[in-house]
Image (tube, rainbow, N blue to C red):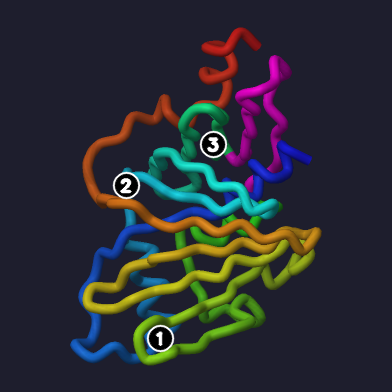
Amino acid sequence: MRRRTLLSAALALPLVGLTAAPALAQQLSLGAVSNYLNQLQTATGGFTQINPDGTISTGTIYIKRPNRVRFEYNAPDESLVMAGGGQVAVFDGRSNQPPERYPLNQTPLSIILAPNVDLTRARMVTGHTSDGTTTTITAQDPDHPEYGNIQMVYTADPVELRQWIVTDETGQQTTVILNDLRSGGSIGDVLFNIRNEMGNRGF
């Protein structure tokens, strides 16, 4: 169960704003949000995570699109969730066992990390609303809704994803809030190499 919670955390991917938006806080279009996601190349920053059981975790995130992300959890957790090479690996900081691994394309994470994000695709978006300040978009894999969904909350001017709520296949929800996420810069590929991480940990 703990590793499943950590995997849910991996899906709770926060992203940083890159493009300009209308001056007024109007509802962002699916095309505009898709363009924003596709422009993201690299980003680093902190995150605060609210777990399904109500506990709170913090850590650092590294993003390198496409298909790569790394969540490093602070003490006392010290766990790690990373995606690379088409896999998601969950390293439990309290276990001496090798990581659990899952196909990236079987998690909602694949929607956001895909080389070409297209939220206008039929049956991908199941919710698209605005309260005048934020735009909320709920997305799923249209071919496999059983994998769960991601609810993304955006603000405008510039477009920025402020909060991410993941509902997994069991109905549990994980919330991630951004802390000073910064786009751009160089991030080494080794941070997303699962085999390398396993070697470093003696597996």
Q: Nearer the viewer, residue 62 or 3?
A: 3
Q: Earlier in the sequence, mark 3 or mark 2?
A: 2
What span is in magenta?
86-104
Q: Earlier in the sequence, mark 1 or mark 3?
A: 1
Magenta span has 91?
Answer: yes
Q: Which mark is residue 29?
A: 1
Q: Amino acid at mark 2?
A: Thr
Q: Amino acid at mark 1?
A: Ser
Circle 3 SS class: strand
Q: Nearer the viewer, residue 81 or 31?
A: 81
Q: Residue 142: which quarter of the image?
A: bottom right
Q: Which mark is residue 42?
A: 2
Query: Label 3: which residue?
Result: 82
Q: Nearer the viewer, residue 72 or 70?
A: 72
The answer to whether residue 80 is above or below residue 167 is above
Magenta span has 168?
Answer: no
